[in-house]
Image (cartoon, rainbow, N blue to C red):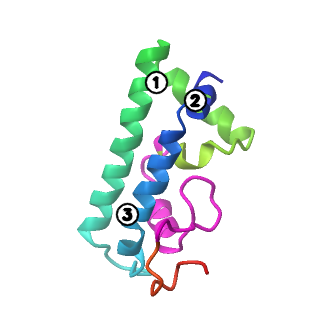
Amino acid sequence: QDFLGYLQANPDIMAGVRSFQNQHRTEFFDLPISGEHKLRYTEIYAEFINMLDARVGIFLATHNRTEQEFHDALVICQATASPFWTPFEVLVDRTDYQKFAERLANDVCLCCGGRFQPENGDPNDPHVLV
């Protein structure tokens, strides 16, 4: 519950997730259906995890919570279908790089799981909604 309040009180966190996706999304448009992925994809995934870890670290420090308490809160977010669950699910299962890559390749929003709507998109980008 504390974490949901923290996210609501800090809209820059979700804005940062959107900005991250906006910055890196086009790099995944050529994601292969099978076979080897570019090293750059895993580097971007690591950047995303590190960005979220930093924000979680601030929360844990300022709210005197443990990583286990945070993990338990994420599980509750998942069970209750909280809208804040989507970007943080990667922190529960860090091995799910594939899901992250597929979301970016298919323009699935990392914040809500819906269709990503780019910010100030290139009008020639076929993924920009008009």
Give the residue displayed 43% in from the left and 79% down from the top. 122
With respect to residue 90, does 70 lie above or below?
above
Residue 33 on the magenta segment = no
> Gap between marks 2 and 3, in whole Å?
24 Å
Q: Which residue is disc 1 drawn over?
A: 59
With respect to residue 46, does 61 lie above or below?
above
Amino acid type, label 2: Ala
Mark in front: 3 vs 1: 3
Q: Which of marks 2 and 3 is nearer the N terminus?
A: 2
> Gap between marks 3 and 1, in whole Å?
25 Å
- In the rendered image, residue 120, in percent from the top left (x then y), is placed at 47, 69
Q: Quadrant of residue 54?
A: top left
State the mark number for residue 9. Answer: 2
Which residues are the magenta region?
91-120
Q: Which of 72 and 105 is in front in this view?
A: 105
Q: Quadrant of the N terminus?
A: top right
Q: SS class of the residue under badge 2? A: helix
State the mark number for residue 105. Answer: none
Amino acid type, label 3: Gln
Q: Which residue is disc 3 drawn over?
A: 23
